[in-house]
Amino acid sequence: MPPALALTRRFTEAGLRAEISEPDRGTLGARIRLHRLVPYQAVIGARETTSDTVSLRLRNGLNLDPMPTQEAVDRIVTVTTSLSLDL
């Protein structure tokens, strides 16, 4: 299973909404700008794929350091269930 699809499945199984921005929608920078108002963007490149990590980008443009995929899922679930805005 492709890494982006596996991550999307993990998010949806945790009760979160998730979608994949397909590569045919332009460059990575263009896809990030297109979805800039989404609360969290998960960027999965070759480095993240090999180490089962994910880089999160927040709506305000802040990039978090790569973290284990399950930690990212858990942090977002915690934030959304507590109705907090901080990650």
Image (cartoon, rainbow, N blue to C red):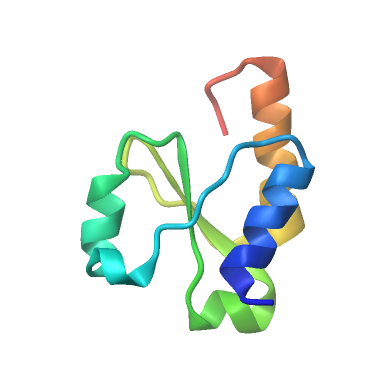
**Residue 63: image x %, image y %?**
41, 51
Report the quarter where the C terminus lies.
top right
- Closer to the camera in the image, 26 or 61: 26
Q: Which residue is drawn at 60% across and 37% down?
A: 17
Count of numbered badges drawn on the protein: 0
Q: Which residue is drawn at 64% across and 84% down?
A: 50
Is residue 44 shown above or below 15? Answer: below
Is residue 48 shown above or below 32? Answer: below
Image-based side of 70 in relation to 39, left or right = right
Residue 68 in view of the camera:
no
Q: Residue at x 72, y 21 (%)?
A: 81
Q: Residue at x 63, y 55 (%)?
A: 8
Which residue is outermost to the top? 83
**Residue 53: image x %, image y %?**
64, 68
- Closer to the camera in the image, 45 or 24: 24
> Residue 27 appears in which quarter of the rendering?
bottom left
Residue 36 in view of the camera:
yes
Is residue 15 shown above or below 46? Answer: above
Report the quarter where the N terminus lies.
bottom right
Image-based side of 27 in relation to 70, left or right = left
Image-based side of 42 in relation to 26, left or right = right
- Closer to the camera in the image, 45 or 5: 5
> Residue 25 appears in which quarter of the rendering?
bottom left
**Residue 84: image x %, image y %?**
60, 18
